[in-house]
Structure formats: C-alpha cells, structure tokens
Image: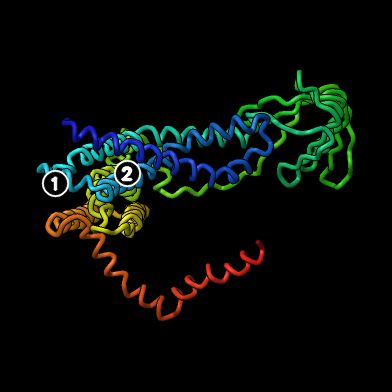
Amino acid sequence: MSAIDLYIARRLARPFLAVSAVIVLLLTLENSRRLMALLGNVEQPVAVLIKLMLYLVPEYLGLGLLIAVFVSVAVVFRDFALQGELDIFASIGLSPRRLLRAPLMFGLAVALLHVGLRAYIEPAGEQRLDALGTSIALGNLGLSIAPGEFLRPRPGTMFHVDAVDRSTGIFRGLLVQSRSLTAAAREGRVINGGHEGVLLRLFDGHVVVTSPSGRLEVTSFQAMAMPIELMAAKPVHMTPRHRNDRLMFGDLWRAASHAPTEPERAAARAAFGSRFVTAAFIALVPLFGFALGVPPKRSTSALGLGLGIMLIVGFVQTIVAIEDGANALAPLFQVAILFGFACVALAMLRAQIRRGPGAIEAMLVSASQPARHLSRWFGLDRLMMRLPTDRQPILSAGR
C-alpha cells in the first residue's frame, strides 16, 4: 500500500471502531432491562448478566459492521472535502477511483470478518445463550433470597426463610409451598437436580399434603428432597430463521441439502444466502459512503449520511423479510436485491465523478426544497426564528 492508502486507512480506523463500539453499547443497554428481569432468582446476577451480554455481542456486531463501514467512509471523505484535501488529491492526479482503493480493501476485509462472524461466532453465541437460559430456568445457577422475604418465582410456588448462612449456604426456618404440598423445616440447602431443576434438601420438619378428597394430611420427616420450580415454563416459538441462526456453516450447509422436508431445506438455503449476500453488500458500502458523504462546495449539508443509513437499514430489512418467507427462490431474490443496490451505488459513483464532488448531496438538497417551501408555507420557520427572541426579555429581566 502506498502512503496515501495508509493515510486513508488510518483515518478510517478510528471512526469505524468508535461507531462499532457505540452501536454494540446502545443495543446492549436497550436489552439490559429485559435481561435483568430473567435474573431475579440467580445467586450472582451480575456475573450472569455479563455472560448474557457477551453472548449477544456477535449478533449486535453483525449489524454494527454495516453501519460502521458506511459512517467511517462517509465521515472521512466529508472531512477531506471540508478541509480541502480532496482538491489537493485531485491536484496531484489522484482520481476518485484511486482514492477508493483503500476504502474498498477496507470494506472487503470487514466483509470477510462478517462471514466468519455469521458462520461460526454468532451461532456459537446463540447456542451458549440458549444453554445459559435453560440453566437459569432450571435453577442451576443458584437461588437468591433475603431472610424474611417471600419468594414467589411462579404461581403456586412460595419460598420463605428466617435466616441464611452465607458461608455454608444453609437456610434456617424454611417454609416451602409447591402445588398441593406445603413443607416447614428447621434447616435445608439448595442442590442442583440436573434436568429436574432445583432440589431443596430439608431436615427436621413437617409436610402438609392435600389429599384428593380435600383432607389435609400432616407427616413428619428427618430428611427430605423436594423439587421447586423457579421459573414458569414458557413456550418457545422459534421461526425457521431463528433456528438457522444457531447453525454453524457446516450444519447449515447440510441442512440446505439434506434436511428431511423441502420447507426446511428452503429455509436453510435462504439463511445461507442471507449471510453471504449481506457480506457482499458490505464490500459495496464504501461506494455509498463516498457518494453520499461528500458535500457540495461551500456547503456543510449532511443529508447523504441520513439517506445512507436508511438505505442500509432498508437492505437489511428486505433481506430478512425474504429469509423469513423461506421461499424456494429466496437466494435468487436476495441476489437480485444485491444487484439492484450495486447498480445504484455504481450510478451514484459515476454521477459523482462526472459532475464533481458533492453532486449527489446537491441533488438531495434540491429534492428537499419542496419540503422547505412547505414548512415556510405553514410558518414553521418563523416559529423557530421567534423562539430565541421570545426568551430574550426574560433573560434580561433576570439580570
């Protein structure tokens, strides 16, 4: 790589990493409350929450890479234009095609990263996420309760203790109710029952059982193991797309060719096409970033940045919708969508080269003029202009 390519690559790296990190953090914070709701009965909720978030990072990063590539390329070339560096590059004979060499190589590298992410890392994260959710539901991660608290993990189940010895994990003064059985014991501890869930090992207590006739029967015991269900069983209805997201590359390939039914094979082929079409689209994203990021001369408009993000989101939603349809021709539809976006990107690049830097942004500004006239007609611009003047007398009176 030449010095120019290295210079552009270094300028691309910082916004790319920053945007990727911000997207992952925003998506993680958005789902943190939902994840915390699942950890009410876990003994160490913070550690489990960190694991849940780490397993979700590959999924969030899959979307973040698309936007990060576009924003980094658009922001860098926008800075080049505003600081006059594009004119300097043109004066030494560097055409836009030559300047796009480093961004296109950068996009290709990110596309390969995306392939590996979707082929192996994201399915592994989904599988571990499912396993961790099952462990939480079965109670394999412990039971957290404060003395004197009535824990009701699900309807019909109640758990109460008088004291807890944190060093040994022994509960003292237990009262447990599960379905038609109520037990009181002097002490007990929680043990892992494997697939049976949480078992309470109770010592020196009494059991009250409701017989089929409605009569209460009381029995004493010295030691007893009693199962307790921490979470209500929730039916899981996964779409074929969600099931295929948990398959690695080899398993997905076998499902696409050897699945027992034709709908399953079609869904696997659609998932296979979605992964590689999205990766191929990432290689095209630098073209959109260059065409939509450069503003016209003596302008700081940024309409192209918003339009580019809308195009990326529209592409992803369209590919996902085709995959959800699980049609036999889904891969052909996905390739057709990719070809259409490639034609749009090449057309924008050609217009940018022929008409000069900022040509696409100038078209967007011209197209937005009717909306500006409409806002003037409704008086929105005058309203915005009056707001500062309305506040001025209040500020001066306060002085």
Amino acid type of the residue tagged 2 in the rendering:
Ser
Q: Judge by depth and name the residue closer to the eye, 82 or 213.
A: 82
Location of residue 37 in the rendering, given as x and y in whole percent from the top left corner:
63, 43
Residue 319: percent from the left, percent from the top? 32, 53
Q: Which residue lies furthest to the left in this view?
A: 93
* Classed neighbour count for the residue bearing mark 1: other residues with Cα under 10 Å, few (<14), some (14–19), many (≥20): few
Q: Which of 130 and 183 is in front in this view?
A: 130
- Pick the residue in front: 310 or 89: 89
Q: How far apart are marks 1 and 2 (CA)?
A: 21 Å
**Looking at the picture, how far across and down is residue 54, in whole percent?**
49, 33
Q: Earlier in the sequence, mark 1 or mark 2?
A: 2
| Vertical relation: 24 (above or below) 320 | above
Question: Which quarter of the figure is the C terminus placed in?
Answer: bottom right
The image quadrant that residue 374 belongs to is bottom left
The circle drawn on residue 90 is 1
Residue 155 shows in the view: yes
Would residue 325 be visible to someone looking at this image? no
Residue extending farthest to the top is: 168
Q: How many labels does the image show?
A: 2
Q: Name the residue under label 2.
A: 72
71 relative to 358 in the view: left or right: right
